[in-house]
Amino acid sequence: MLNNKDQEDLVNADYAANLLVQNLDSIAKSTDPLLASTAHEVLQQAMQIEQRLQRLMSVTQP
């Protein structure tokens, strides 16, 4: 379905989203309440993006 460049870009985006989720999860455990709260909010959004990318990968891979 996807050409090679699009497939590679999708894989790279999924990898980056996964890394972002991991880092935000660590930051959300901070002892600084403002930092932890903000990271938690952004973490929820990053998790949604990661899930969407994973769905795209599952329906576009041969």
Image (tube, grey):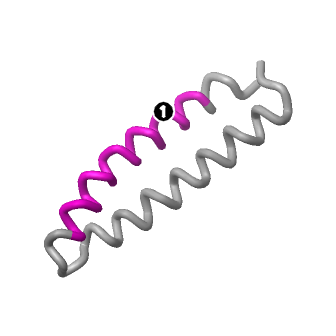
Q: Is residue 11 left or right of residue 22?
A: right
The x and y percentages for residue 59 are 62, 23
Horizontal side of residue 6 vs 44, given as left or right: right
Task: Determine whether 16 is above or below 55 in the image.
Answer: below
- Residue neighbourhood size for the residue with mark 1, other residues' Cα within 10 Å, grouped as few (<14), some (14–19), many (≥20): few
- Between 47 and 61, the residue placed more toward the observer is 47
Q: Amino acid at mark 1?
A: Arg
The secondary structure that most of the magenta stretch takes on is helix
Q: Quick check: 29 above or below 19?
A: below
Does residue 57 belong to the magenta stretch? no
| Residue at the extreme right | 4
Q: In this figure, what is the number of numbered marks?
A: 1
| Image x and y of residue 18, in percent | 51, 54
Query: Which residue was labeled with disc 1?
Result: 52
Query: Residue at left 58%, top 54%?
Result: 16
Query: Which quadrant holds the N terminus?
Result: top right
Magenta stretch: residue 44 in it?
A: yes
- Which residue is drawn at the image coordinates 83% and 35% (left, top)? 5
Relative image position of residue 44 (x, y in whole percent): 30, 47
* Residue 41 in the image, given as x and y percentages of width and height: 25, 52
Work out which residue is located at the far left of the displayed protein and give it.
Answer: 33
Tell which of 41 and 1 is nearer to you: 41
Secondary structure under the numbered disc 1 in the rendered image: helix
Q: Is residue 42 left or right of residue 57?
A: left
Question: On the picture, is 59 further left or further right than 37?
Answer: right
Q: Is residue 22 above or below residue 6?
A: below
Q: Which residues are magenta?
A: 35-56
Q: Residue furthest top?
A: 1
Image point (43%, 67%), residue name: 23
Image quadrant occupied by the C terminus: top right
